[in-house]
Image (spheres, rainbow, N blue to C red):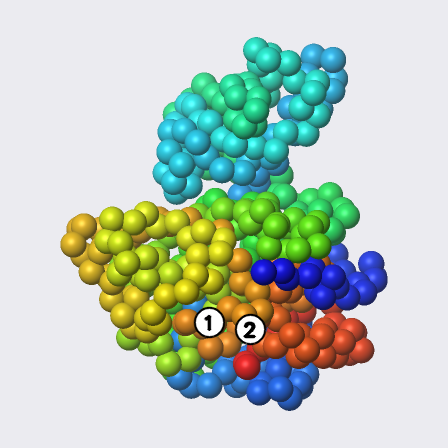
Amino acid sequence: MEIKISDYVYDLPEDRIAKYPTEPRDRSKLLVCNGGSISHHSFHQIPELLPKNTHLVLNNTKVIPARMFFKRDTGAIIEVFLLNPVLPSSVISQAMEAIEVSVWECVIGNKKKWKDGEILTATLGIENKQIELKAEIVDRENNHVKLQWTSEIVFSKLVETFGKIPLPPYLNRSSEDSDLEDYQTVYSENKGAVAAPTAGLHFSEQVFENIAAKGIIKSFLTLHVGAGTFMPVKTENALEHPMHNEQMVFTLEFIKKLAKNLEFVVPVGTTSMRSLESLYWFGVKLIENPACSFFIEKLFPYQKREEITAEKALFAVISHLENSNLTEIVGHTEIMIFPGYKFQICKALITNFHQPSSTLIMLVAAFIGEQKWKEIYQAAMENEYRFLSFGDSSLLIP
């Protein structure tokens, strides 16, 4: 099987990449593609544009200031960009509560200058205390960095004090104080992402009030967005692209609510869409093998098998949690969605406009059609939409 990444290229001029969000955030443009016809709106109108039977699903992950900068005695700056926790737990929510020591897989800037055994230090002021933070490479091959600090301050507090928000590289600017709020959804809650679920940046409290007034149901899941979301596909056959592994958290309450409200599920963003579809495939895995782990491999959905309904798959997950006395479950996914994929749960999608040559463009093409995505992006260009993380939005209904 071959998927040519050259089929997912379009011309994106630098001046169409939004460097900052629209103010106020719900006044961004909204392109609607419904059954093939394209129309143009403002995002604050979305409650009127969604059917009453919509079940809106949002990703409540919270971006952490994951970039830390240490100075060597020589004056050289070493960047430690947190990716995934290793110890005391690989579960992000638990890692954020660590005290005194934590080990993370990182991207290390200026790595060659950081010698084995060399401890880098920084002094922070937190809660009227002077805290010394130490960093050391403990596994150079896997980029594991041990962080130690001299206080019972939780790791999340330490990161918020010392770290910088990791803006997408294509913005070509340094992070600013305003990004602490701008690059965060108004409903962000569970700390651990290194990139925002940007489709949600357009929502305001007023939009949510109007959605509730219409009787639209909304639910929250958590997918901690990783840095791999920015990786362009560098292989001509996109199937050879190494998909990044992302951690998801679903509560039993959420899964039960989803199972009862499957008629018109609308994920906000590709992160929510990947999570929902991965949850379905976990149910399929449980039906095939009750002892399976919650890990959805890149091409697992494309294996030939008997079709299983969304209801049946979700019931299998609910039974698994109830039989295991669990109120939530943590899973991992590297699911790759490209044309030919059959969507199991999602009926529409709210999403921004994505980078050329990206897996996210492939996902949009799989959902809305291989020719239709090009028409949508052309219409967005002609109508002066702003692109990427701080750009405008779209509502796609096949």
Say if residue 337 shows up in the picture. yes
Amino acid marked by disc 2: Phe
Q: Which residue appears at 50% of the width and 83% of the height?
A: 50
**x and y percent of residue 154 in the render?**
41, 32
Question: Can you tell which mark lies on residue 73?
Answer: none
Residue depicted at x 45% and y 51%? 297
Q: Secondary structure at mark 1?
A: loop
Say which element carries label 2. Answer: helix
Disc number at residue 367? 2
Above or below, 178 relative to 391: above
The type of residue carrying mark 1 is: Phe
Look at 56% across and 49% down and name the residue there.
243
Q: Dots 1 and 2: beta carbons under 8 Å?
A: yes
Q: Foreground: 302 or 111? A: 302
Q: Position of residue 101 (x, y in %)?
A: 43, 23
On the question of residue 161 being in view, the answer is no
Q: Which mark is residue 343?
A: 1
Kindly report the distance in space between the C-alpha atoms of the residues bearing marks 1 and 2. 8 Å
Image quadrant occupied by the C terminus: bottom right
Seen at 35% across and 50% down, the residue is 294
Residue 99 in the image, given as x and y percentages of width and height: 39, 27
